[in-house]
Amino acid sequence: MKVAVVAPLVTPLRPTATGGSQAFLVDLARGLKRRGHDVLVYCAAPSDVPGVELVQVPVEAGLARALVAMQGSTQHVPAMRDAFESLYAELGRRGAHVVSQHAFDAEAIELAEGLPVLNTLHLPPIVPGVVEAAIGSNSRFCAPSQSARDGWRRAGLASVGCVTNGVPEWDPGSVETAPMALVAGRISPEKGVHVALRAAAAAGLGRLLVGAVYDRDYYEDTVKPLLKPGEMLPAMPRSRLWSVMARAAVLLAPIDWEEPYGLAAAEAQMAGCPVAGFRRGALPEVVEEGVSGSLAEPGDFEGLVTAIDEALGLDRAAVRASARRRLSMQRSLDAYEAALAEIAG
């Protein structure tokens, strides 16, 4: 198949991914290419993604203002439609048997109408314009977890399916773990970063926060006062983050929203690192409780501290085996390949 993978245009694609959807679509594109498909990734310029062919779309400065806030708000940026019109015009010139569309923008959904497209909804139905565009479309849609699919169905998108995300397999080898709790990902309220830092301290663990500041006010007012020197590192390339995960005692995910998947939690388990968090969103699907992690009821701080203690006692080889069985990118590729082939005819 000739597959066009459409990325969000709010930011370029970089080795240090802006978010889970960007990281996943790069893995998807590389995986489909390895399976013999002709893959082009349509993305914002200037992007840098080794291993796949890019079609880079010039975008106006300031498009990042359209990044979605988890409260469901996003700034309307008129240049977004212009950018996607340019992208789809170039896609039309180059041609494709099928389009794998990953941008969470109404414009991306509307302009793909009539194409052989699978729109992946990487966020919950929190932006009214995106919900309206999806419900009004005749295209195919999928979500990265059963939880996310159910949320979209409740919002009125009855036909949405589920094609789960996955993460690459890798062998961490024999490494010595440290008594350290890791918090990884974007720094914003819905990720519960401040709760994770407090819970790690209550459990008597060292702490390391790795990620980019997504909500500056939240970071300055709530997270930064909890941090000690040396407890935070900026976002880093995934291969380096995976090595950090392999040495961490536990990854913390006390989420405060309907997490559509939880890529960091999946990656941690693939590194043999158990997960402790809240039983919300897709986390119960990503974590095999009692085997690869332990979850507490949402908002239960003491339960979270107990979950950390339980996770610390899990066998790390079993954690990794569970991840390889359930969360492998190969399983996701199988599902995407079948779904895209069906649409391509």
Image (cartoon, rainbow, N blue to C red):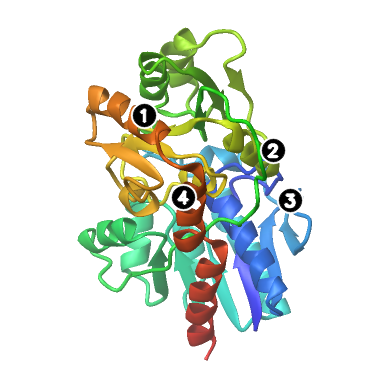
- Give the residue displayed 38% in from the left and 42% down from the top: 293
Q: CA distance from mark 2 to mark 1?
A: 24 Å
Q: Residue type at mark 2? A: Arg
Element class at badge 4 = helix
Q: Which residue is mark 4?
A: 318
Circle 4 Cα neighbour tier, 10 Å, few/some/many (<14 / 14–19 / ≥20): some
Q: CA distance from mark 3 to mark 4?
A: 42 Å
- Give the residue displayed 66% in from the left and 63% down from the top: 86
Q: CA distance from mark 2 to mark 3?
A: 25 Å
Sequence-wise first label, 2 or 1: 2
Element class at badge 1 = helix
Relative to 151, does residue 160 appear above or below in the rendering? below
Q: Position of residue 116 (x, y in %)?
A: 52, 81
Quarter that holds the N terminus: bottom right
Element class at badge 3 = loop
Sequence-wise first label, 4 or 1: 1
Q: Residue type at mark 4? A: Ala
Q: Which residue is mark 2?
A: 240
Q: Nearer the viewer, mark 2 or mark 1?
A: 1
Which residue is farthest bottom?
345
Q: Is residue 281 left or right of residue 93?
A: left
